[in-house]
Image: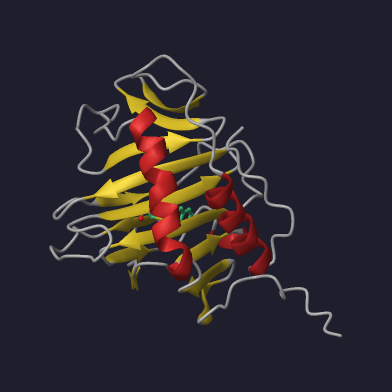
Amino acid sequence: MSTDLFDDLPPVVSRETLAPGAVLLRGFAREEGAALLQAIAEVTRQSPFRHLVTPGGYTMSVAMSNCGALGWVSDRSGYRYDALDPLSGQPWPAMPAILRGLAVRAAAQAGFADFEPDACLVNRYEPGARLSLHQDRDEQDLSAPIVSVSLGLPAVFLFGSTSRSDKPQRHRLAHGDVVVWGGPSRLAFHGVAPLADGEHVLLGRQRINLTFRCAG
Ligand code: MD3
Ligand code: FE
């Protein structure tokens, strides 16, 4: 009889440590990709993708939605997590079990045994869309990791240190790649280079990134 703790986890094509606390699980979500995209389509039917405005007055090139108890929003007054979708005034859609389960299993693989995300930010990139270098520090529990899932077109992910001026490493993230960002990497500066055009079999000319967070 096998007692492998990871017996019921999907096959991991590879596991790579990008930096202390940052674990890349290449292909972890690949076989579930189509089912994940179906769940995301249901979320964005209820809370459509929208281009948020930053406190500085810029409209983001990435379009965003959320699911879960809390959602990340930005407007002229600042960044925050909110229980209500400002477009509808209603709660964000619940986090689909297939999304939550994937994030919890990925966190466990990376050594975070009791990850309980209450927020999932859904980012949509079209060709040319980018995310400039930033830190994620609006979450209540900075001891919890962030789990990210890449779907659709590949992107060049920029991963720096906790100092904005350090030159970031570049990593290609493809459909099905999952990264767990915890420990000393949790407050690292990061961003996404402008998306190159292309055609993905499931998503066409788009990339979707999910980030699971303990926000509240
Ligand atoms: C490293 N999203 O939504 S995911 C974001 O691809 C965000 O859409 C990017 O950055 C995207 O805030 C990158 C990878 C990621 C997410 C959070 C991190 C890397 C991180 C937090 C700390 C360090
Ligand atoms: Fe981020």
Asked if residue 158 lies left or right of residue 205, the reply is: right
Residue 68 visible (yes or no) = yes
Q: Nearer the viewer, residue 87 or 137?
A: 87
Q: Nearer the viewer, residue 87 or 40?
A: 40
The image quarter containing residue 62 is: top left
The image quarter containing residue 157 is: bottom left
Residue 166 visible (yes or no) = no
Asked if residue 181 lies left or right of residue 169, the reply is: right
Asked if residue 68 lies left or right of residue 198, the reply is: right
Location of the C terminus by quadrant is top right
x and y, in percent, of residue 51 in the image: 24, 33
In the displayed orientation, state which residue is furthest to the right: 1
Q: Nearer the viewer, residue 35 or 167?
A: 35
Q: Nearer the viewer, residue 90 or 31?
A: 31
Q: Residue at x 24, y 66 (%)?
A: 201
x and y, in percent, of residue 206 in the image: 22, 55
